[in-house]
Amino acid sequence: MFNKRIFSVVLAGLLVTALSGIAVAQAPAAQAPMARIARLKTFLALTDKQAADIQVLLKAHQTAAFPIRQDLRARNQELQNALDAAQPNAAAIGQLVIAQHSLKGQLRTLDLKLESDIAAQLTPEQQQKFEQLKSRMGKRARRG
């Protein structure tokens, strides 16, 4: 009885992790790069050269992140299938969650590099505004 309860709790936790992973994997893809550049250009008062340089950085980030996001989507689907199985295999589910965690870490590393590369293109005043923007975006992501 106790083992079934633990198994149920673990499965529920894994399901929440899987669903949050789907949201994380899809959120950045929803914004078109040009729209992001336009908003940054306005908010940070970027020069045309800065905007062009940042656009190159965003394109490189998108190119590097794409295969990782595809892999994460595949792991999410595998996890969902494993959870929906008549007799879910806890070890297999655990391995999928570990794989997801690793992929999310890779995406976080790419995101941090992008932020750092963008900040390197900015003046000190723009960097302050950029930090404010990141702070606001972080709060919004935690809410939603």
Image: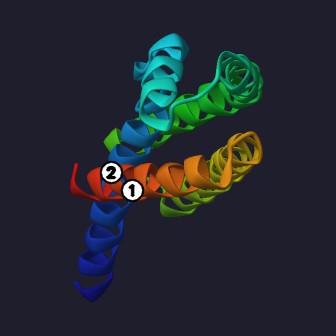
Whether residue 87 is visible: no
Q: Position of residue 90 (x, y in %)?
A: 48, 62
Q: Nearer the viewer, residue 16 or 133?
A: 133
Q: Residues within 10 Å of mark 2 (few under 14, many from 20)?
A: few
Residue that mark 1 sits on: 138
Residue drawn at the location 68% of the way across and 19% of the way down: 55
Where does the N terminus fall, quadrant-wise?
bottom left
Q: Marks 2 and 1: in contact by CB < 8 Å?
A: yes
Amino acid type, label 2: Ala
Residue that mark 2 sits on: 141
Colour pattern of the rendering: rainbow
Amino acid type, label 1: Gly
Residue 24 higher or lower than 141, as above or below: above
Residue 129 higher or lower than 6, as above or below: above
Which numbered circle lies on residue 44?
A: none
**In this image, 119 relative to 133: left or right?**
right
